[in-house]
Amino acid sequence: MAFLTMDFHSDALGMATALSVILPESAKTQIGMGGSRADHFPTLYLLHGLSDDHTIWARRTSIERYASRYGIAVVMPNAHRSWYCDMAHGGNYYTYIAKEVPAVCRAFFRGMSDAPEMNYIAGLSMGGYGALKIALRSPGAFAGVASFSGAMDPANPKHVYNGSSYWADVFGPFENIRGSENDVYALAENAIREGTLPKKIYLSCGTEDSLLPCTRRMEEILTAANVPHRYREAPGNHNWEFWDGEIERTLDYFFGET
């Protein structure tokens, strides 16, 4: 596998930024790693949480080794503390992650395809929320979405909101979040009505995680509508021991099963 850090200018953000990319590589002498590469390969967009950046998945998990089993690319962009929003007072991070990053990567890396069946998105905590939001607002763009310990309910003060001006800078008025384009529960219900959900959906959260009610609520919405999905609730907290196992399971679900 090849690992790249790409520094480039984002028109959506109006500034220089960076992302990390894992690419499949045909190398027969890599010890303990896969060595095959197709002309076109699936791409997983992998999103970070609130306190992290584009480097964190590679630093805290074995994502490169897991990806080598399936010959996939992994794109890990930096969204700062944006909640993957076009912020009320700040950068257009939803546009950047959902639209510009895939276009830029496909321009630089010819093996990446825009075919829906070749694209997947996942994330943890804030990134779990972001992955769901992007997938649900992009009908037909992704074959699969996964959320680990997703901070899915920014409209619920108990889970996320802390009353600071930062929250208003991200989302605008607190009372306007519910039912908006930043409400993943409303987006899921609309996607169910429209029949536009990704084919593979994976939700997981640790039983000791304070954000467990967020994931349970999304699972209840999908179950009530008889939507096929995979749900895992297991011992664990809001930490990398849990997420390292979850990304490995998700890659097997997305790419290892027929």
Image (cartoon, rainbow, N blue to C red):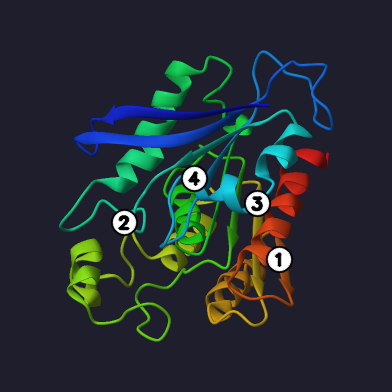
Q: Badge 4 is on which residue?
A: 55
Q: Quadrant for residue 41, please give it.
A: top right
The mark nearer the N terminus, 2 or 1, is 2
How far is the residue under mark 3 from the one under mark 2?
A: 23 Å
How far is the residue under mark 3 from the one under mark 4?
A: 11 Å
Locate residue 256 relative to residue 190 in the image: left or right: right
Locate residue 150 relative to residue 88 in the image: left or right: right
Amino acid type, label 4: Thr
Helix, strand or loop under label 2: loop
* Front of the two marks 1 and 4: 4
Q: Quadrant for residue 95, please give it.
A: top left
Residue 108 image offset from top left, x and y in percent: 45, 17
Residue 243 image offset from top left, x and y in percent: 65, 61
Q: Badge 1 is on which residue?
A: 231
The mark nearer the N terminus, 3 or 2, is 3
Residue appearing at x 82%, y 18% in the figure:
29
In this picture, is 192 found above or below 26? below
Q: Badge 3 is on which residue?
A: 61
Q: Badge 2 is on which residue?
A: 82
Q: Pick the residue in front: 252 or 191.
A: 252
